[in-house]
Image (cartoon, rainbow, N blue to C red):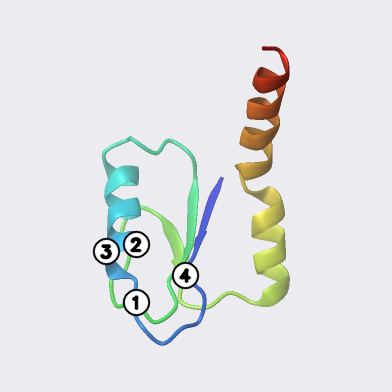
Amino acid sequence: MIFVTVGTHEQPFNRLIQKIDELKKDGTIQDDVIIQTGFSTYEPKYCQWSKLIPYQQMIKNVADGDVKRRIRNFMTQWESH
């Protein structure tokens, strides 16, 4: 799972959100994607999204995200060299 968050700043991040949505649509991103869109006006069509996400759910999304696995795999490869 990939978790994208833009925070709660009162400016939109439409280009970022739209690009992630396009990457999901065309299959470049295979993982499930959850986007917290904040004040953005673009509404994703191919990703799960919410304007705001409660703090505890944000913590869960970060914990469930794929970053930890990717870092662990990178470190394992790095150490083997």
Dot 1: few (<14), some (14–19), or many (≥20) neighbours within 10 Å?
A: many
C-alpha gap between disc 1 and disc 4: 9 Å
C-alpha gap between disc 1 and disc 2: 8 Å
Amino acid at pointer 3 = Arg
Q: Which mark is residue 51?
A: none
The residue sitting at 31% across, 58% down in the picture is: 45
Q: Badge 4 is on which residue? A: 6
Q: Nearer the viewer, residue 56 or 73?
A: 73
Q: Are marks 2 and 3 in contact (CB under 8 Å)?
A: yes
Q: Nearer the viewer, mark 1 or mark 3?
A: 3
Q: Badge 2 is on which residue? A: 17
Kindly state the secondary structure of the residue where label 2 is placed.
Answer: helix
Quarter of the image where one finds residue 25: top left
User: Which quadrant of the figure contains the N terminus?
Assistant: top right
Amino acid at pointer 2 = Ile
Q: Nearer the viewer, mark 1 or mark 4?
A: 4
**On screen, residue 12 above or below 65:** below
C-alpha gap between disc 2 and disc 3: 6 Å
- Residue 12, percent from left and from top: 33, 78
Q: Residue furthest top?
A: 81
